[in-house]
Image: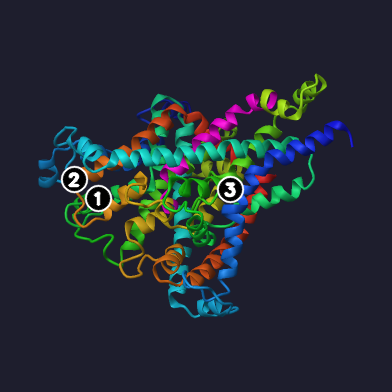
Amino acid sequence: MRLRVKLDRAPILSGPLLVEALILFVAAVVAAFPLLLLVSNTFKSANDVKRDPFGLFTSFEFTSLTLAWSEANFSQFFINSVVITGLTVVITVPLATMAGYAFARLEFPGREWIFRLFLIGLMIPFYAMMVPIFHELKAVGLLGTPLGAALPMAAGANGPGATAGMAFGILLMRSIFMNLPEEIGDAARTDGASEIQVFLRVMLPLGIPGVAALSVLAFLQAWNAFLVPLLYASARDGKPLAVAVWGFAAGRTPELGLLAAGSMIMVIPVILVFLVARRSMISGLSSGSFK
Amino acid sequence: MGPVRRSQRRTGLLLIAPALILYSTFVLIPAIANLWFSFTDWTGFVEPSFIGLDNYVRMAEDPRIHQALIRNVLWVIVGTVVPLSIGVVLAVILWQHPGPITSGLRVLYFIPFILPTVVVAVLWNWLYNPLQGWLNHIFSANVNWLGDSNTAFASVLVAAMWGVTGFIILIVGAALTTVDKDLTDAARVDGANGLQRLWHVIVPQISPVLITVATVLLIGGIGVFDIVFLLTSGGPGTATETLGIYTYRRSFLDFDAAYGAALAVFLTILALPLALYLHRRRLT
């Protein structure tokens, strides 16, 4: 018995520990390998791309990145992605925060009924609205514009597997505000604050962690979205990175280095936001949707 | 009615109005319009006329729907069970050994999940390349992974599972922080091996979260589109055509918008019990 305890504590000698380390290692290789391939192909010289397209780290230069950025128009697609994503976040977050607060803390007629109406949105897949939205946008002249992709995404028509959008955001913000103590608002009301002042000056600052989580999730979803911009914002100069990278990959002779560089341009902001806002992202994904 | 209540009433309606208008315009009204179109002969261009349940009758006899449905069922089962099992095992191992290496691995495992699906598709397209791709190289094989109808569907599914497992590790990892470590230590002293401890001690404690994650994956599997479209567009032929891909093709490529609308209604109904179940879990 004594020996067993000792073995359990000794890291490398213990059998189960070795198996566990091996599992972690294999998983790490599987997770990392495609990413290494992306980095490798992005920084490869044009010659090496032709000679040995998938060899790892055979050369290191910035030619593909600069070519993709300036010649292959990826700077424009990057800006398009920024505009579409920015609009989506700027529309989703304030509207969902306002409505989430109202559903959590205010009494008004039809509250339960309207809240249920929003919940329906989480149950309808994007397929069941994609064609009518297309014609709506066309009718008002928004088809092919950044707003044409941003408005449906902000409303919650996010394509399969939505984790952001209006209904999700309202649900998240409602639970944030419901968990704040009731007395804080009442104290401000006794001091003569109006309902709007209670919301903006007292409750909203306390709900900032929720606002941050929702913003990060809305960014991630809009930046990565594919089908929505494919349908509503795939004009030649107006398409975001997702549609551009796809178009590039589906071309007859995709230039591998440029494709890698374009993908890299799309990935870098996601990784940066993840590194900066990791806590917000994780809390939004784990607590908001999975109580 | 007191002044507080009257003011709450006004403020409440004011605060929900913008969200409600946007939501009605781009979710509710389009969904209702879609339901109406499913009862018409609309091609996408000329005025639709009402044809009752004809589209639904056609659907019942459409072999492509049956095949797509089988693929979706396969996708849902394999694409839920496999990532969930791998994710739980990895999350539990990470949880048992807190430290700098495991927290670094946590970050690494999560990255595929936040990658754009477009980029996931680019990367796996390279790995699956029949001439110089790494998969054929590693297995000394000569398989046209995405181009052969025998391997295409499984290949797409593998790429999708690579992208989703990090999400499960994250959610399960968060749930594990509430698990009582003393219990697993006690089971270890009692002689339970790693798998027994996992199954009998840990899994029961996190089962609510596991059920929620599984439901999310199931709903995602019924509606799957992006990764399939990006890797194979449903091909070769219709070998990887799921219900989502078929709906898209009918709606936008085949000038058969009304039939696409009916397919979308079918997809909605298919996912509805799961979606309702997920809501009950989220709200209580």
Q: Quadrant of residue B253?
A: bottom left
Mark nearest the camera among 3 and 1 is 1
Q: Residues within 10 Å of mark 1 (few under 14, many from 20)?
A: many
The numbered mark at residue A54 is 2
Instruction: Please state which of residues B87 and A137 is positioned toward the viewer in this rendering.
Output: A137
Percent position of residue A154, x then y: 54, 45
Tags 3 and 2 both on a single chain: no
* Disc 3 + disc 1, Cβ < 8 Å: no
Instruction: Please state which of residues A142 and A117 is positioned toward the viewer in this rendering.
Output: A142
Q: Residue at x 38, y 41 (%)?
A: A80
Tags 3 and 1 both on a single chain: yes
Q: Is residue A255 magenta?
A: no
Instruction: Please state which of residues A242 and B77 is positioned toward the viewer in this rendering.
Output: A242
Tags 2 and 1 both on a single chain: no
Instruction: Please state which of residues B276 and B245 is positioned toward the viewer in this rendering.
Output: B245
Q: Residue furthest top?
A: A191
The answer to whether A150 is drawn above or below residue A61 in the figure is below
Prevalent SS, magenta region: helix
Element on which disc 2 rests? loop
CA separation in Å, label 2 and label 1: 8 Å
- Which residue, given by chain and number where applicable, does mark 3 sit on? B212
- The chain ID associated with circle 1 is B
Is residue A19 in view? Answer: no
The answer to whether B148 is drawn above or below residue A184 in the figure is below
CA separation in Å, label 3 and label 2: 39 Å
Q: Residues within 10 Å of mark 3 (few under 14, many from 20)?
A: many
* Range covered by the magenta-colored residues: A202-228
Tag 1 or tag 3, which sits nearer the N-term? 1
Percent position of residue A101, x then y: 68, 35
- Which residue, given by chain and number where applicable, does mark 1 sit on? B126
- The chain ID associated with circle 3 is B
